[in-house]
Image (tube, helix red, strand yellow):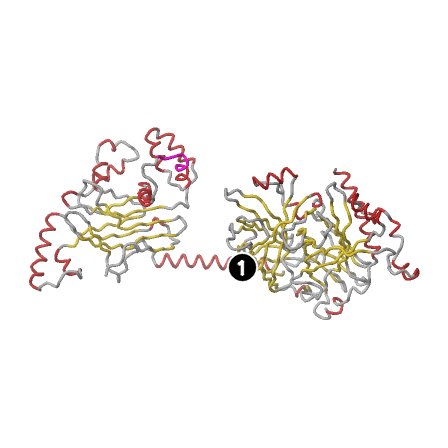
Amino acid sequence: MAEVHVVGQITGASGFPDSSLLCKWLLQLGGGWRLVEGLAEGQTQADRSEVGEEIVWCHPLDIHLSTRGIQGWPRLLLQVYRQDALSRVDVCGYGIIHIPTHPGHHTLHCHTWRPVGTFSEEFRRAFLGGGPQLLSTEFIHSSLERYRLSTIASGTVHLDIGVILREFDKYGIAT
Amino acid sequence: MEPSRDQCAFYYTKDDIENLQIKITLQQLTGSQLVAVSPRVVEDTQAGRQNEVPLASLTTAATYPTTHHVTVKWQQKILSVCEALEYRRSIYANDPKYRTRHKQAIKRRKYQRIFTYVHEDNYQLQEQHSATTSKKMEQECCLRQRANRTRGNDSVDSEEVSEKSSVVAKEDKKKRPPTTFQQQYLYIMADLAPQESLGESRVYETVLCVLKYDGQSQLTVTPDFNMPTTKAYRLESFGPDNALYEYQIENVSLTRSAEERNQEEQLANQMARQRIEEIQQMARLDWDTEGQPGQGELRLMTVGEITRALYFPEASSLYIHYALYLPPGWRVNPGTECEGFTPTCWLSHSDEVAAAHFSTPFSLDVTRSSSGKGWPLLLLAAFSLDWFGHDRDEGYAAFALPASGPHDKHQVKDGLYQVGTWRPAQISPLAKMRRFFLGGCQLMSDPSYLAVGAQASSQVGRVSRLGFNTNTSGTIELRASTVVQADFIGKDLQTPLEMPPGWQLSTVAVIDAFNKSRQKLRAAKQGLL
């Protein structure tokens, strides 16, 4: 059985509208995978940038996984929410990103999107907040249901991830 | 110099807060002691001091004690003189809420100066009010009450309510969830009034020590506990007698015995060992042999995402259709979706280039048999959607799944690949106008284009091998990383993996593959809409 360590952080985000942002993350695993240690989901603090556009979270990730096969490689499901001055929380970005299969350090950028509604809904959203969100995160990763979604490009989430693989070569696996 | 009384110390404790015990020693400095401790007093003669000591002890011992020792537990109530006078009244004897205080008040020794305010006394609120600049006359509005309640200081209200109807209040208290993470206060106070006027007013009440506990193992002590090396804190009463006091705060908490501690450590060690064993067992589970490549076979798994589309100038919203093309001799392992769509994404112009973000994951798991040739391709087609819901083809591309590791020269950085796309060019102005106004995928709807194969071009001597021109279109960005599994890995890994995709998949085949799957899509859409 091979093991994977994922050590890194969700460094921050850019390109989102100007308000305080927070990111919920969830690690999705295939059937043969087991979480040995660490948290498989979490949430960053709500950060608001006072200097520039860049949001900084520096949210640590430290996950130890073990696997019986290579199928269902782990991936991170990211959801970015914004919190406005009245502490209402709206979704403003969905994204998904696979953990790299190569060992070493990786700087990743996850380009997120959000569902877009009708003209009146968008008009409402611009002034009052809210707006459509996905009923289930299932839509993000099921490939055939997705094309019915209408979305708009949103900001980018930045991650710094280090990957350590163990005993993969024992099973004739190269990455 | 005596230490300052406003310094604050933080303690972290995993122990139960109920075990906390604090010993307070308050001492009034009489004349002879003043000489001994105060630097302000000029040195007296030896004889004078000797005379004074027995005098002072004689006079004070007869009337009242100058030194007070009190050991306070966490949230232990010790009544002040004023409170004792109040609670001694017989009306509190039958009140269930104040019965204990009444008993305490009767038992209380008169000359005890040290007392406490527990959390329910809400002394912290009085302190806060005196520190704020808001008018004290201001009435309690509903917002303020709510703010106080959310801060957890709602006992003021419940007290008022309980006087009216204690039954209702009790029910309310039961319903309320326990506020475990609430800040709890304990004030250790002293009444420094002159001996004869003790209990007449609250003016001489002084805070000796404030303890705050946040319910999460953080204890704040202001001022800090006295160490054996530090001097006692000093107080002045500012009363008519102008007495000087010294006091010491000692931490005399119940500590565990060495045996108990030993046991606990052993338990913790045992638990840690069990956890390590568990982890080792988890990591020792058998490898799943399903999908394991056989002799001479090669399994290729590519995971990644279609991250975004760039430089599509004519489109306002885009979606990408991807399909896996497998050359002969390859097979798909179960659980792989060979084709899919991204959501339809409106372009955002906030970056320097207009981009559509997809972040659509794909996971392709394929196996090459020993007789297999070629290398699998991911076929990509970008379509734009106009205001009327018409599709328009924007670009086609084929992306060879990456074979080598992170040093692949095609990738931009960290597994990122940028794939340029092309689309058939419309030459006649009529076709251009039709495309502009009506949209549609002209190429797909007219199969005659496909009739001209790749082989034909060389025979007929055309410039283009398709028989039509193409235009360069935008760029699709995707991230991909691969896992390769084979029984010959480690021996001559480089030979099979370095095999370049030297063959050219016929563009017609690309279009043909898309044609098929678009028909499926259309059927699906008609069924849904």
Magenta region includes residue B144: yes
Type of the residue with mark 1: Glu
Whole-percent x and y of residue B201? 20, 40
Provide the residue designation for mark 1. B277
Residue located at (22% from left, 39% from top)? B84
Q: What stretch is highlighted in magenta?
A: B139-145
* Magenta span includes A125: no
Tell me the quarter of the picture where residue B46 sits.
bottom left
Relative to the observer, which residue lies in front, B352 or B523? B352
The correct choice, above or below, for B229 with respect to B118 in the image is: below
**Residue lying at the far top of the rendered structure:** B165
- Identify the secondary structure beneath mark 1: helix
User: Taking B336 as reference, is B22 left or right?
Assistant: left
Question: In the rendered image, which quarter contains the C terminus of chain B?
Answer: top right
Farthest residue, direction right: B460
Left or right of residue A158: residue B333:
right
Residue A71 vs residue B512, the one in the foreground:
B512
